[in-house]
Amino acid sequence: MKKVFTMLICLVLAGSLPGQNMSSILSAGDKARYDGIMSALQRHDYLNAIIELNGFIPGYSTYWDLYYNRGIARAGLNDWIGARRDFILAKGSGCKMENINYLISKQALVSFILKELKQEEKLDSLREFRPVIEPGDIIRGALRPERTCFDVTFYNLTVKIIPETKSIEGSNSICFKTTTDTKIIQIDLFPDYAIKSIKWNDRDLNYTRNEGGIFIDFGETIPAGRDEKITITYSGVPMVARKPPWNGGFVWEKEKNRWDVGIACEHLGASSWWPNKDHLSDKPDSMIINVQVPAGYQGISNGNLASQTAIADGYTNFEWKVSYPINSYNVTFYMGDFVNFNEQFTNSFGSYQMDYYVLPKNLEKAKKYYTQTKEILAIYEKVFGEYPFKKDGVGMVEAPFEGMEHQGAIAIGGEYGKSNNRREYYTKDYDYLIIHELAHEWWGNAVAVPDMADAWINEGFATYSEFLFAEEKFGYPEYIRVAASNFGSVMNIWPIVGERDINSNTFLGNDIYTKGAAMLNNLRCIMNNDTLFKNMIKGFYQKYKYRIVTTSDFTDYVKDYTKADYSDFFDIFLYKTEAPILACSYTIDKGNNLTFTYRWSNTGINFTMPFCIAVSDKEYIRLTGTSFLQTYRYKGAKTFYLVNESRYDKEKVPANSFTYYWTSWPF
Ligand SMILES: [Zn+2]
């Protein structure tokens, strides 16, 4: 799924500072001093801005601008604890800016995010203001015996799209193998749909419904190891998406009297539109999807088109075959006036087809836009291994919402790179949207997670793939630029590994993307051996493709591969909200001797991580911190700063030194 928020500092501190017009009340001498502070801030010289403000504030202690600006300077150093203190002082001194609340209060920040996503959920103050767990979350998220007793092998889904009434009707035949003796199984479908029948070998089965769960009673015990099939027939009005893809559901667009319809349902759940075992731990080995649309429209879905048949009521049935395991949330359809064009991708093993479905008005634009796809594919095949769904081919479909990684039928919105997409951090020839969504075919679709708690693997690896694309295509300095852009969006609201068994909405707050990718970057910096790191990522992919992977599978894999113990590192980056803090201090004496002391705090005792300092604004030096105090000395230093996402020269950053972390200072 596409990331929703961009730079955190932009989000939190958006807008120009109204201020209290300090300049008008200052004496000439103080005005020059104040202007000096402002220009230090503009130069990103945060350390000196803080030191100067510390001297300035006592004379003007009632002016909130000063605390606010010092907060911004501290935020520029990633001294978020100090920044928060300053923003509280600014608010206490009369600052009325709404944005300040997002930094002071987690509750306010989460409420803001939910408002942006048009989600109405109550927050739980006992769980760090996560959304309250509702009974339906447990029905959806937990693995109980009614679910672990069977393994889905195949779905044959038929869905008829009825635009006039914005409703659907259909059926799903579910083939499964029992893994333990059972009398009852759970299938999921949102409660607003009517179930016409549930059939087992022409026998109608009884069932009860609880929230989104359908508990189906076979009336007898089915022994373990049996292959069975049930068919559920249903109809209803699907939920309309409030902010797709993040707050999902159906999208019913109409332009010039022609429909353009689609669905995005990650986290919301596939059971919002078709009955299935809606738990990430179980994927069918393959699937058929019949999309039925009014004659004259195309019905596009995952996999390959097997047949197109005119059926009753002036409808056309488009039958699609998926030859691989597929996540329920990746199953999709698009109804519209699509035109198709395609090309072949050839690698050393053979070739496969790349299909594009676009609205006719955008055909020329799209043909130009998609010239980048082959290059992106080639880079991912190089760094991860061959495209995982060759038999189904690559597919991209114009969608009435921004991107979503529907397997073999990726949703491409955003008007072919022309939308207000602030995350296009490449040249005009490469769009972040394709780079990100295509990476999901490897990460999220081929390698998949069993619980939303582990969704950082999908988004963290897809986001880190953007870094690797930049590095492969443009070189290491561009890798640094993409990393910096991502670090600046980390929010640190909750740990990136979410709560298990409740269908946790780990997408809220973005960190599964940005902090997940930052964690991978930092791990690479710590390992300080690019060949080892890149082979490890490739090996991890190869081991887990078409399989399910948990967070501990990943950390165990790293441990096995490197024979090193990174448990203190994983503990803070995966399971803690806050980042490691570099506790540091520096002086430059009259003889230009720099003394810099540093150590990692807020971490386990075995935590070790490199970072980068700049001396005299030209020399970038990689240092490795531990939890023990160290001192670094340098002769002939004119200036000093820490290199981070707010202040860096991408050309000068030494290999494996640009890490994400917080800081604290004695001033
Ligand atoms: Zn994504």
Image: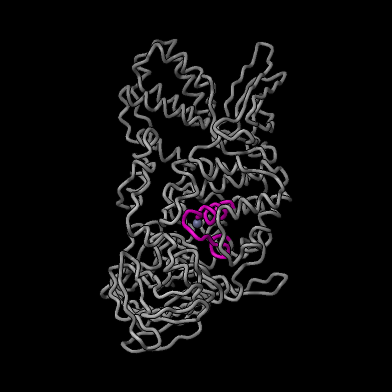
Would you say residue 295 sits in the magenta stretch? no
Task: Tell me the quarter of the picture where residue 654 sits.
Answer: top right
**Residue 123 x/y as whole percent:** 32, 45
Q: Residue at x 50, y 28 (%)?
A: 42
The answer to which quarter of the image holds residue 597 is top right
> Residue 169's image quarter?
bottom left
Q: Does residue 444 show up magenta in the picture?
A: yes
Residue 467 as seen in the image, left or right of residue 118 = right
Residue range of the region highlighted in magenta in the rendering: 443-464
Residue at the spot x=61%, y=73% of the render? 390
Q: In this orientation, which residue lies closer to the viewer: 251 or 495? A: 495
The residue positioned 36% from the left and 33% from the top of the image is 100
Residue 365 in view of the camera: no
Looking at the image, the residue that sits furthest to the left is 165
Q: Nearer the viewer, residue 607 or 368?
A: 607
Q: Position of residue 576 (x, y in %)?
A: 50, 41
| Above or below, 166 relative to 413 | below
For the point 59% across and 67% down, the residue is 546
Return the x and y of residue 478 as percentages of the image width and height.
Answer: 62, 46
Q: Nearer the viewer, residue 148 or 517?
A: 148
